[in-house]
Image: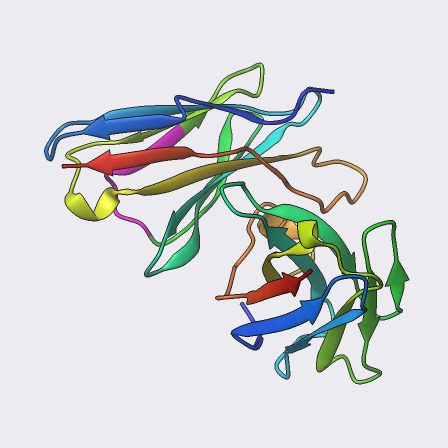
Amino acid sequence: KAGVTQTPRYLIKTRGQQVTLSCSPISGHRSVSWYQQTPGQGLQFLFEYFSETQRNKGNFPGRFSGRQFSNSRSEMNVSTLELGDSALYLCASRISTGGSYEQYFGPGTRLTVT
Amino acid sequence: DAKTTQPNSMESNEEEPVHLPCNHSTISGTDYIHWYRQLPSQGPEYVIHGLTSNVNNRMASLAIAEDRKSSTLILHRATLRDAAVYYCILRANGGTSYGKLTFGQGTILTVHP
């Protein structure tokens, strides 16, 4: 089974621009969560989507948004980029049935804002 | 979310056992204890989880204290590929918490050949 894939792997943007990151979960997984990883703050939860609905949200400003499609693929969008948004963005998928707790992470998208 | 406390770093020699401790004194009765690890330049990887009883899988063992205020991840024979940051995470059971993991700073494990 293919793992979680994220595109693009690397991205350079300028302050004020917006960016869209994509995540394809493992086949059959219906839940997708997004995390931001920075050296200063570590790994922080952004949000989770299940069946195209946002189920949980972390403490991030409204510039961070996401969505999930009917095939469980997910995108996250960051508008009006700031230098502090430079980070590794990770998505993770989970089966979300039968009490499964394991999350499977993708390799991440490295976003650099200049 | 209840918090966990882990040592910042630990060192081990190859082929020796490694015991990674985690304190979680404010754990609630329904919190699960999860361990993930993150190898360099990769996303986190699930290692093991448990509630009350000790757990074993192909990667590691998880020993949970009787009062559940602490736990220990045991790597039976460390290899160089086990060098990673290990995260001990408490996850509330049920509801919308399933998809949310609250990561702490973790323990950086260095394995010497």
Q: Is residue B90 visible?
A: no
Give the image location of residue A95, x and y in percent.
71, 33
Q: Residue furthest left?
A: A16
Q: Please tell me whether residue A61 belongs to the stretch shown in magenta.
A: yes
Give the image location of residue B90, x and y in percent.
63, 65
Residue drawn at (76%, 60%) of the image: B78
Locate the N terminus of chain A by quadrant: top right
Q: Which residues are magenta?
A: A60-66
How many marks overall? 0
Is residue A101 or residue B94 the one in the foreground? A101
B81 to the left or right of B41: right
Locate the C terminus of chain A by quadrant: top left
Quarter assignment of residue A71: top right
Is residue B24 or residue A83 the one in the foreground? A83
Q: Residue furthest front?
A: B113
B51 to the left or right of A104: right
Give the image location of residue A21, x and y in percent.
37, 25
Is residue B80 or residue A46 the one in the foreground? B80
Q: Is residue A75 visible?
A: yes
Q: Please tell me whether residue B105 belongs to the stretch shown in magenta.
A: no
Quarter assignment of residue A8: top left
* Colour basis: rainbow
Position above or below: B108 against A61: below
B40 to the left or right of B113: left
Residue drawn at (85%, 63%) of the image: B76
Is residue A44 or residue A1 the one in the foreground? A1
Position above or below: B101 against B12: above
Position above or below: B33 against A97: below
Quarter assignment of residue A40: bottom left
Give the image location of residue A49, x and y in percent.
52, 34
